[in-house]
Amino acid sequence: MELKLSNSEKRIIEKIVKIIKEKNNFIITTHTSIDGDAVSSELLLYSLLKNFGKKVRIINGDPLPSIYKFLPYSKKIKDISKVKRKEKADVMFVIDCGNLERIGKVKELISDQTMIINIDHHFSNKMYGDINWVNPSYSCCGEMLFYLISGLGNINKQQATLIYTSILTDTGCFTHHFNKNVFFIISRLLEKGINPSEIAKKIYLERPLNSIKLFILALKTFKYDMKNGICWMKVTKQMFRKTKTKEEDTEGFVDFLKTIKEFKICFLIKEKDGGVKVSFRSKGDVNVDKIARIFGGGGHKEASGCFIKNITPEKAEKEVLKVIKSMFC
Ligand SMILES: [Mn+2]
């Protein structure tokens, strides 16, 4: 079996490769609330650019969740709040990001001269780049980079581990968003000696106990609307304080709600400084990207999110329910 790219995608990839060869100073970034695809894709690009001998910095708007610290090259990732020299880049790769607002404070590193390369698989991508390689038919950005990197030579074991992590996490452990090429690609990655069970163990079987204490508190806020098939819960700042946890410890909470048979839409409200973050999930029959977009966010059909400014969790709960009911019930 051969994997074929469309001619228009081949042309975009050629343009990207040309820029990689010509330019020297690169920044790689992704969306805040970093997930497995976001970080793995950044590290994949990092390794590729380093192989070309380029100056590369990975700078993110949020700290890296500790479950991803086992990934190769992850020590190279910097959080913008810790970057002292706010030097601009010639080229900024923005990965897995539907709109430029989602990179947070990293926007400060863009000048009028910065060329932006937008690589993404979100349906709602705003095409904000000077070059836009955007195609929602891919399972994850790691899959896109598989084509870019394998077109330039051999994929090494570290890169294969990163591509596998992207696919595993962005398909929700192969429950959604995969396509006919995914398993073929994985067979190629296995040939490079990756260890899928070790990767899954690092990501899914090493939860800190405090995150479970947070989960217990969040479950006390669990509510549902049986008639319309909706369930939700909330995590407040007070709960974070009480359990000594942070946002990354809510990883998997909303996916747990999704496992409940009776419901087709679920959401999690997280209280943050300046507002709340809402994460939505569906089982495919409802498009939660549409819900998130009403609040200025976005994502995929089955997983999306938004940030609502200056609102309490209680108020947000009412607003979100109102929108869902007006759209789908
Ligand atoms: Mn993704």
Image: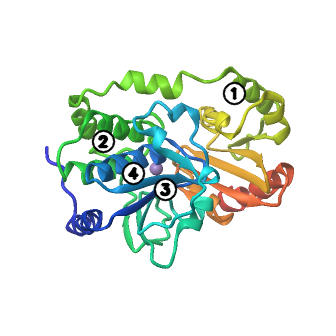
- Disc 3/disc 2 C-alpha distance (Å): 24 Å
In the image, which disc is placed on residue 141? 4
Q: Do callouts 1 and 2 mark residues in contact (Cβ within 8 Å)?
A: no
User: Is residue 262 visible in the rendered structure shown here?
Assistant: no
Q: Considering the image in quadrants, where does the N terminus appear?
A: top left
Quickly name the residue at label 1.
211
Question: Closer to the N terminus: mark 4 or mark 1?
Answer: 4
Amino acid carrying mark 1 in the image: Ser
In percent of width and height, residue 157 lies at 27, 33
Residue 264, by quadrant, is top right
Question: Is 41 situated left or right of 240 in this image?
Answer: left
Q: Is residue 15 above or below residue 257?
A: below
Q: Do callouts 4 and 1 mark residues in contact (Cβ within 8 Å)?
A: no
Amino acid carrying mark 4 in the image: Cys
* Residue sitting at the far left: 1
Ligand 1 within 8 Å of the CB at mark 4: yes
